[in-house]
Amino acid sequence: MSTTQAERMGVIGLGYVGLPLAVEFARGGLRVIGVDVEPERVESLNQGRSHILDVRSEELAPLVSEGKLKATTDFGALAAVDAICICVPTPLRKSLDPDISYIVQAAGEVSRILRPGMLIVLESTTYPGTTEEVLLPKLEESGLKAGKDFHLAFSPERVDPGNQQFTTRNTPKVLGGVTPACGERAAALYRHAVAHVVPVNSARTAEMVKLLENTFRAINIGWVNELAIICDRLGVDVWEVIEAAKTKPFGFMPFYPGPGLGGHCIPIDPLYLSWKLRTVNYTARFIELASSINSNMPEYVVEKITGALNWEKKSVNGSKILMLGVAYKRDVSDMRESPALDIMALLFQKGAVLSYADPYVPELDLLGERFVADDLTEGFERFDCVVIATDHSAFDYQRVVRESKVVYDARNATAGLTPAPGCRLVKL
Ligand code: SAJ
């Protein structure tokens, strides 16, 4: 099979990975069909309106009006393309096992329209072996043979939502094929959309590269979270320790303790790897240890809040507690796996009278209750404790330590601030 140039391509899944990718391919001169299962998302995209932070409608609209980018819910529209990138979610099940059902569903749709000469690339983060062991056989149900009749590769997404410096176009793109020719074909395709392609020798290698990247973060965050607990036991300021360690100009990279591990990547990707290793009778001890430390941080934080209230002769039960920030990290609205929600749930179960404030989250449902964000106009005196769980830039931390009775700062957001005489400030 020849390595044909792609003129037309498809992207399945128009979320924070798929839409920026579709836009870059369209800007690179290809005609792109984007497929998504959400009709209202498809409709707004075809009107030139973007639902993704990193894709401005001003850059999307001309691509749509010039016919370079079209969205649809119809997988059949992909029958006409030369290449398809699959960018669907890979969450965890409640049992903490990988949920690759979206990949399998997309593969079934692609298999129905697969033609000789097509290139299929999986971008969804998953365990090593998924492309060859799950996607390949599903696509070969078409009767076509991978590496012979069609090309198949894996290329991990490296999208960092909101990152103005590193974009889909300028972030190096790792990719690996199930055969060398598949890898070469994928590299030729991605050169339309990204500045720097990084070919590796197999799809399995490319799958593992992504898991190394994010497991590296999860394990190091787990280590600094344990360091925070250690420093607390030894009466040392963990934040000062890290700031001083950062002065080492080589061989050190700072990570910071926090209330736990949030987001849809870092808490999840390492568990895809440890799950896979269990199927080959191996225990990924570092991953599982970091995961247990990180997931225990909300309980650790609640223990410290309880202690701080105790010094005020108050119990959690009946105390008015304000959660400052509920998103999973600073200056984002995403609440997936947010540790702030775990802390709220634990406090709620202990009888706390909870409020929250978050400029990015107007309201939230938790434990069957609807909470509406407090606009903070009435200040902080009315709360028995203010918990800084997510250090959004918009908060006035000077006012927090001036007005609050008790502040529990899980993010070192009050660094350098002197609390008013009546404010008990406790830091992680
Ligand atoms: N966190 C800490 N301490 C740290 C860093 C993060 O507690 O030192 C917490 C955050 O508060 C958050 C969670 O960990 O709850 C994850 O934070 P993150 O900074 O890793 O951000 P994510 O989840 O947006 O990770 C993404 C990843 N991008 C991709 O997978 C393509 C990750 O690889 C990036 O390195 C990261 O963004 C980034 O650097 O922004």
Image (spheres, helix red, strand yellow):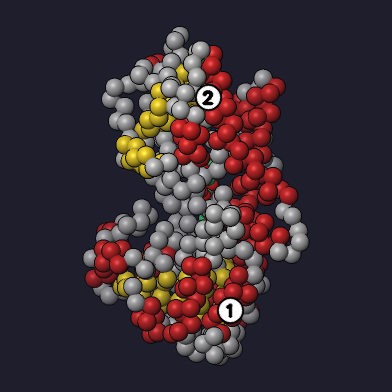
> Which quarter of the image is occupied by the C terminus?
top right
Choose between 184 and 405: the one closer to the eye. 405
N-term mark: 2 or 1: 1
How busy is the neighbourhood of tag 1: few (under 14 within 10 Å), some, or many (20 plus)? many
- Kind of residue sitting beneath label 1: Leu
Identified at 67% across, 26% down, the residue is: 231
Tag 1 secondary structure: helix
Cα distance between the residues tagged 2 and 1: 51 Å
In-front residue for pair 399/134: 134
Q: Which residue is drawn at 50% across and 90% down?
A: 116
| Element on which disc 2 rests | helix
In the rendering, at what x and y percent does residue 378 appear?
Answer: 29, 22
Decide: is 84 above or below 217.
below
- Where residue 99 appears, as percent x and y from the top left, is 54, 62
State the image coordinates of residue 386 (x, y, percent, origin top left): 43, 24
Q: Can residue 193 be seen in this view?
A: yes
Please state if 112 lies on the left or on the right of 33 as rendered.
right
Mark 2 vs mark 1: give the one in front.
Answer: 2
Task: Specify few, some or many for label 2: CA neighbours under 10 Å numbering under 14, 14-19, or 20 or more.
Answer: many
Residue 238 is marked as: none
Ligand 1 within 8 Å of the CB at mark 1: no
Q: Which residue lies furthest to the top in this view?
A: 421
- Residue at horizontal 37%, vertical 36%? 358
Q: Position of residue 177 (x, y in %)?
A: 60, 75
Q: Mark 2 points at which residue?
A: 305
Q: Are marks 2 and 1 in contact (CB under 8 Å)?
A: no
Q: How many marks?
A: 2
Quadrant of the frame with the N terminus: bottom right
Q: Name the residue under label 1.
A: 136
Query: Mark 2: is the Cβ under 8 angstroms from ligand 1?
Result: no
Q: In this view, does 386 lie to the left or right of 173?
A: left
**Taking 242 as reference, is 287 above or below it?**
below
